[in-house]
Image (tube, grey):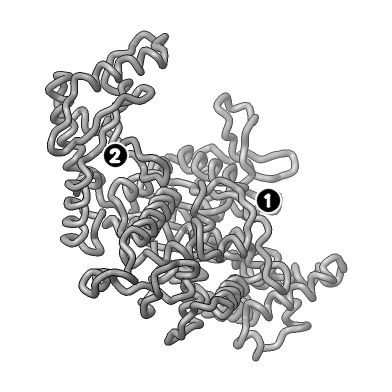
């Protein structure tokens, strides 16, 4: 890969000056992210990483002085056209003609696999990863956190597959608990079997809202408790109704996820681990980890000094399991079933404490693989509403995206007819939605704006789609995302590259060029994406699926 060959060339010259082996220098030379601002370097060497600064009082000015001295000893060659010193760094600019030729040659050679064959990944072992994401609660509101978990989890899964890893995608549904007792009673009162088949998520939600109004009524409470008790005892009729709730809901989820370009290898749920969670409680007791409180609940002491300053409740006073107990059972079951190298959970950051406890308990139980479990958390999104009001289901979001994008297309004077405007609007709209979400660190909260997300100019998914057909990923950027599972590195790089390509369009106009030069421009996307641009719009080219990484 181009970046690796340039890095090797720089390391070779540094090796002679510093009298250090090139291999030890390569990892100290980092690629500088592409920027729309003035570009001062393609690669950078951190002075602190190659000099002996054991005296902790080494000042920034000393590092800068060392950088200047080292830069003076280095010479430009056929690869490096410019060398300069920065604050504690030596900067290297690559010969522009060589850079362009090398990168374009590599792109043409590797095609869609450009960036994936990089030496950067040669030392990274291929692994099997289990990724749990999306995980909505049946009959409850599909809030924005579930949407974010869906697209972030899908990104991580797609990234790992692209880099040659094996991935098992799991959707761990909220399909158990006392709320199903309430839902069962509600369905007996307000349910409609035809509506359950045709629109299960919407109908079950309506039923749940109706029965919830009477949730404080003592008779309703008793009926709900009786229904759930029958469910736990595997009463045939009760279990059959619950199974319909679950199966019809999953069928609708599959259809909706398909619109997002998302699929799962396994639809699991809390219901799968009712009995196994009791086995976990027995294991905790046998290992001397389960302690009983005065109230009769079961806890696990997580404190270092064993003074209960930190603990996790794993059992109710009646002996039944809790959410974390079922998660323990699920983690153990998945590891036994898949023998995976890593297990990743994608949820909002409010559950960070829960997963910290989960991994701690697994370690205390003697499962060393708990070290390979990871919680990828994300922040909150405020302000996402449809025109009808608050977001309830994922389908509401998808329909809203398509509707707003169609309206934007219709209002643009340069819009040309496309074969399937609905499909185009949905794909571009979804890309816009995902890019707005991925621009910052996942842990950050942000204010959602439909207008900002769907703009055709600026750092948006709509603008990114315009240049997508011509631009491919850079191995350095892929590597960074593969290390910290943050999509912002790829998104930032692609957006910057798209802006630079837009500058190239102005420098190399199509309109006034000779036919043989003008035809060098590959097919671009519909005219409404070229609003306020001088070059005429080209025929519609197929946009990429929004769910792709």
Alpha carbons under labels 1 and 2: distance apart: 59 Å
- Residue 176 appears in the rendering: no
CA neighbours of label 2 inside 10 A, class few (<14), some (14 to 19), many (20+)? many
Q: Position of residue 527 (x, y in %)?
A: 45, 76
Which residue, given by chain and number where applicable, does mark 1 sit on? Answer: 316
Q: Horizontally, is 259 left or right of 536 in the view?
A: right
Of all residues, the one furthest to the front in this rendering is 512
Which residue, given by chain and number where applicable, does mark 2 sit on? Answer: 42
Of all residues, the one furthest to the bottom in this rendering is 194
- Residue 427 appears in the rendering: yes
Are the two marked residues, 1 and 2, in contact with CB atoms closer than 8 angstroms?
no
Q: In this picture, is 48 found above or below 216?
A: above
Q: In this picture, is 324 found above or below 453?
A: above
SS category of the residue bearing label 1: loop
Q: Depth check: 110 or 484 in front?
A: 110
Q: Depth check: 70 or 443 in front?
A: 70
Residue at image x 59%, y 42%?
353
Q: How many marks?
A: 2
Nearest to N terminus: mark 1 or mark 2: 2
Q: In this picture, is 305 found above or below 504?
A: above
Q: Horizontally, is 41 left or right of 74 in the view?
A: right
Residue at image x 38%, y 56%?
503
């Amino acid at each position: 890969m181009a970046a690796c060959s340039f890095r090797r060339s720089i390391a070779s010259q540094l090796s002679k000056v510093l009298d250090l082996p090139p291999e030890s220098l390569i990892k100290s030379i980092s690629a500088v992210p592409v920027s729309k601002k003035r570009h001062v370097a393609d690669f950078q060497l951190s002075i602190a990483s190659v000099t002996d600064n054991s005296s902790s009082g080494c000042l920034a000015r000393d590092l800068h002085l060392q950088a200047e001295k080292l830069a003076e000893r280095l010479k430009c060659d056929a690869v490096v056209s410019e060398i300069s010193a920065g604050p504690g760094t030596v900067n290297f600019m690559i010969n522009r003609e060589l850079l362009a030729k090398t990168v374009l040659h590599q792109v043409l050679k590797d095609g869609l696999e450009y960036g994936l064959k990089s030496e950067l990944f040669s030392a990274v072992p291929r692994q099997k990863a289990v990724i749990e994401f999306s995980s909505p609660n049946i009959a409850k509101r599909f809030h924005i956190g579930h949407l974010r978990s869906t697209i972030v989890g899908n990104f991580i899964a797609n990234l790992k597959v692209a880099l040659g890893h094996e991935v098992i995608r799991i959707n761990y549904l909220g399909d158990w608990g006392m709320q199903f007792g309430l839902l069962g009673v509600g369905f007996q009162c307000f349910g409609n079997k035809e509506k359950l088949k045709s629109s299960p998520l919407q109908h079950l939600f309506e039923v749940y809202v109706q029965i919830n109004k009477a949730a404080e009524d003592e008779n309703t409470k008793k009926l709900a408790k009786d229904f759930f008790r029958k469910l736990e005892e595997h009463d045939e009729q009760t279990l059959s109704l619950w199974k319909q709730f679950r199966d019809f809901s999953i069928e609708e989820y599959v259809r909706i996820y398909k619109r997002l370009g998302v699929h799962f290898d396994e639809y699991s749920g809390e219901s799968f681990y009712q009995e196994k969670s009791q086995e976990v409680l027995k294991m905790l007791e046998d290992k001397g980890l389960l302690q009983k409180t005065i109230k009769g609940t079961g806890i696990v002491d997580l404190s270092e000094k064993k003074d209960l300053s930190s603990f996790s409740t794993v059992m109710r006073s009646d002996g039944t399991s809790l959410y974390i107990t079922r998660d323990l059972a699920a983690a153990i079951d998945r590891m036994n079933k898949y023998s995976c190298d890593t297990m990743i959970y994608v949820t909002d950051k409010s559950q960070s404490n829960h997963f910290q406890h989960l991994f701690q308990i697994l370690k205390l139980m003697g499962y060393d693989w708990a070290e390979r479990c990871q919680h990828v958390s994300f922040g909150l999104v405020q302000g996402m509403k449809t025109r009808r009001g608050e977001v309830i289901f994922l389908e509401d979001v998808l329909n809203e995206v398509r509707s707003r994008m169609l309206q934007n297309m219709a209002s643009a004077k340069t819009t040309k007819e496309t074969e399937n405007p609905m499909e185009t609007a949905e794909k571009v709209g979804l890309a816009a939605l995902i890019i707005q979400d991925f621009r910052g660190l996942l842990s950050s909260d942000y204010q959602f704006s439909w207008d900002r997300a769907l703009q055709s100019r600026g750092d948006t998914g709509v603008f990114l789609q315009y240049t997508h057909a011509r631009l491919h990923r850079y191995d350095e950027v892929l590597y960074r995302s593969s290390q910290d599972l943050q999509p912002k590195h790829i998104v930032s790089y692609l957006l910057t590259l798209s802006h630079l390509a837009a500058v190239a369009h102005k420098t190399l106009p199509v309109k006034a060029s000779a036919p043989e030069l003008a035809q060098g421009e590959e097919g671009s996307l519909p005219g409404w994406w070229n609003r306020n641009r001088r070059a005429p719009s080209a025929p519609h080219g197929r946009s990429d699926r929004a769910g792709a990484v």
